[in-house]
């Protein structure tokens, strides 16, 4: 998401003041190659040499060869090749603090200050507007995502500052100054700045690698000489079966705590002020520092799984150091997974009917016996590639609905519109686990009365609420007329379950604001967008971010997130009890009402509710 902010010209002056507190230690220097994997990620035969950017001098404490130190000036230079030529990038070190400023046409786009003595990193803005896009850049283009919709974005400051403050008070990060430059661990710089800069940088004990997609670090197989490797493969060979040294254990634990303290978006939702204390109270903290790899791995995994959050998990485990163990999911996720499997079977049976050869797909529309109700489902918010959506003449393909949910909605409502008896439309998101936020915002105008919808996002790190007003080209005439929407023609009902998560949860919440009714059980939450942080030792974690989906009242300055889900207007279980729980033996207990996917039964429920 672009954050075009009217940034402060300066951040708190105390962070740029000199300080008499020094750390001295002997250090070694090592020159390594820097590779940006975006340059070869799309190649059918990716060659590492084609991803080469430059040479970089890293610093290491004597005897600590796995933790590189780098100056902010060196870190900023990694982006040099990908910045708009008009951009002015400046790094200044004063005392034991250093700042990085990005300007374009005299407009301040990005500003960061790091102070190891204050144990803080302050970040304002981002680099999305400063990066080149297309073949020579790393900034992605979203032509298909933007197709068929117009969005007006604005923001409002609701906190006292317009910058994020990240603390590493509970972390053990070293630093030193040499030759006028302040050197900090590369992992700290990457974790603190990667969200704003969009580029992830890691050292795999051999070379530096950067990518806008951290999956590439673990999964992209590139040819290095005659053999194929991944970043992780090279890391495993560099370690060669050694045990993780104590200094690296401490460093890795500090990186994990830094991420969870500053970037886990549901920390306030759970009432957690200090993640360190929270993990201490839950008897996990000491295990982060264990010399036994399996104990550490279980502790890190449990530290995320305990939140019952489908947006958060350790995705890649540390093969280099043997940290491969995983903790069991908490009961909420287990119940959601079990319910999802059962509902998939029930829905297929209902849509398939007696025709065993018929394979239901997203967008298949069913009609009630009396013809008054239409019903369809979709399980994700997705957009297709240009080739999947458009033909060579720039026209939308007939098959585009298979890849693009906006095109699917167009086709489905065109079909429903051809049935004049339809009064009610049930949109089934009971198995919708989410997807792309921009797609969701393109779909909401279909349900409106004036081809307009509003979505709000709250960035809790810097106290900014974003407002996105969307209109859509619903009928494909390349216009955006108010009479294209269907809110005045149909009564909308959104079928939900606990499996309706993330965008699948936000969609019914926003639909209720547009006048639709929710039928089913309370949706499954997931108000935060997903963020990714790649830990320095071959682990990366998906987690709920500081960007929250919800509703904002500009008069009262109140933001209400959607983590608690959409409460059904027409609950299908007695007292809206969950459709699946996990008993003490770890087994699912189902409470799925008969006729959950029966369109005639649902039509009767709707009629009874309206009467």
Image (tube, helix red, strand yellow):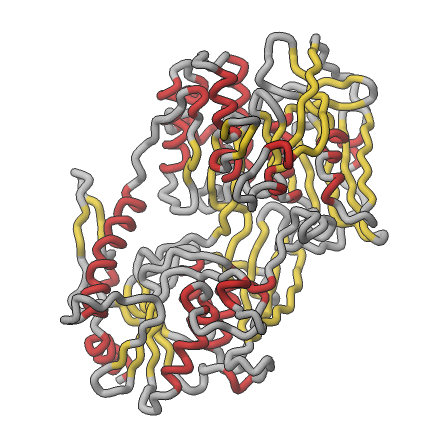
Of the pair 292 and 216, the residue shown nearer to us: 216
**Residue 40 spot, x, y in % from top left:** 59, 41
**Among the 4 quarters of the image, the one containing residue 73:** top right
Quadrant of image for the N terminus? bottom right
**Residue 511 spot, x, y in % from top left:** 43, 71
Q: Among all residues in the image, which is located at the extreme bottom?
A: 420
Of the pair 473 and 516, the residue shown nearer to us: 473
Of the pair 556 and 451, the residue shown nearer to us: 451
118 sits left or right of 171 in the view: right
Residue in the picture at 64% in, 24% down: 185
Quadrant of image for the C terminus? bottom left
Inspect this view and state whether residue 46 appears.
yes
**Residue 109 spot, x, y in % from top left:** 75, 49
**Residue 453 spot, x, y in % from top left:** 53, 72
Q: Among all residues in the image, which is located at the extreme front?
A: 226
164 sits left or right of 7 in the view: left
Residue in the picture at 57% in, 26% down: 225
55 sits left or right of 530 in the view: right
331 sits left or right of 292 in the view: left
Query: Does residue 443 sit above or below 126 in this rendering?
Result: below
């Amino acid at each position: 998401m672009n954050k075009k902010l009217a940034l402060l010209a300066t951040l708190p002056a105390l962070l740029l003041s000199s300080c008499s507190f020094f750390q001295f230690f002997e250090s070694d220097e090592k020159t390594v190659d820097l590779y940006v994997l975006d340059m070869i990620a799309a190649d059918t035969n990716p060659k590492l040499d084609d991803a080469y950017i430059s040479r970089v001098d890293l610093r290491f404490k004597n005897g600590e060869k796995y933790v590189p130190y780098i100056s902010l000036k060196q870190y900023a230079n990694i982006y040099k090749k990908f910045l708009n030529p008009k951009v002015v990038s400046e790094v200044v070190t004063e005392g034991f603090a250093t700042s990085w400023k990005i300007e374009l046409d005299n407009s301040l786009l990005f500003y960061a200050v790091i102070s190891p003595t204050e144990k803080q990193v302050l970040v304002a803005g981002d680099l999305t507007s400063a990066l080149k896009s297309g073949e020579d850049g790393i900034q992605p283009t979203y032509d298909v995502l933007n197709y068929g919709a117009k969005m007006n974005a604005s923001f409002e400051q609701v906190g006292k500052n317009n910058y994020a403050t990240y603390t590493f008070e509970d972390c053990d990060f070293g630093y030193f100054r040499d030759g006028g430059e302040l050197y900090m661990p590369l992992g700290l710089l990457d974790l603190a700045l990667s969200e704003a800069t969009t580029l992830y940088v890691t050292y795999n004990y051999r070379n530096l690698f950067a990518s806008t997609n951290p999956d590439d670090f673990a999964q992209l197989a590139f040819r290095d000489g005659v053999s194929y490797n991944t970043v992780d493969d090279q890391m495993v060979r560099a370690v060669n079966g050694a045990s993780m040294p104590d200094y690296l254990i401490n460093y890795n634990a500090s990186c994990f705590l830094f991420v969870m303290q500053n970037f886990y978006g549901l920390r306030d939702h759970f009432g957690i002020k200090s993640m360190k204390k929270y993990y201490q109270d839950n008897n996990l903290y000491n295990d982060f520092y264990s010399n036994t790899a399996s104990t550490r791995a279980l502790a890190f995994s449990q530290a995320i799984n305990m939140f019952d959050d489908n947006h958060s998990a350790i995705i890649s485990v540390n093969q280099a150091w043997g940290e491969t163990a995983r903790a069991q999911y908490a009961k909420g996720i287990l119940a959601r997974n079990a319910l999802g499997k059962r509902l998939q079977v029930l829905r297929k049976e209902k849509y398939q009917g007696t025709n065993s050869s018929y394979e239901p797909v997203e967008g298949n529309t069913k009609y009630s016996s009396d013809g008054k109700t239409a019903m369809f489902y979709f399980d994700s918010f997705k957009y297709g590639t240009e080739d999947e959506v458009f033909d060579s003449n720039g026209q939308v393909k007939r098959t585009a609905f298979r890849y693009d949910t906006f095109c699917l909605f167009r086709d489905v409502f065109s079909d429903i519109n051809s049935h004049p008896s339809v009064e009610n439309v049930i949109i089934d998101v009971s198995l919708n686990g989410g997807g792309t936020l921009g797609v969701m915002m393109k779909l909401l105008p279909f349900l409106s009365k004036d081809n307009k919808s509003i979505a709000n996002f709250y960035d809790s790190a810097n106290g900014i609420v974003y407002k996105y007003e969307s209109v859509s080209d619903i009928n494909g005439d390349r216009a955006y007329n108010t009479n294209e929407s269907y809110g005045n023609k149909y009564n909308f009902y959104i079928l939900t379950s606990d499996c309706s998560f993330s965008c699948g949860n936000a969609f019914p919440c926003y639909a209720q604001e547009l006048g639709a009714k929710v039928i089913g059980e309370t949706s499954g939450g997931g108000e935060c967008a997903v963020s990714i942080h790649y830990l320095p030792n071959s682990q990366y974690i998906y987690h709920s971010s500081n960007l929250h989906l919800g509703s904002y009242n500009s008069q009262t300055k109140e933001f209400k997130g959607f983590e608690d889900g959409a409460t059904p207007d027409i609950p299908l279980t007695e007292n809206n009890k969950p459709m699946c729980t996990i008993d003490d033996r770890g087994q699912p207990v189902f409470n799925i009402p008969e006729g959950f996917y029966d369109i005639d039964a649902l039509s009767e429920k709707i009629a009874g509710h309206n009467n």
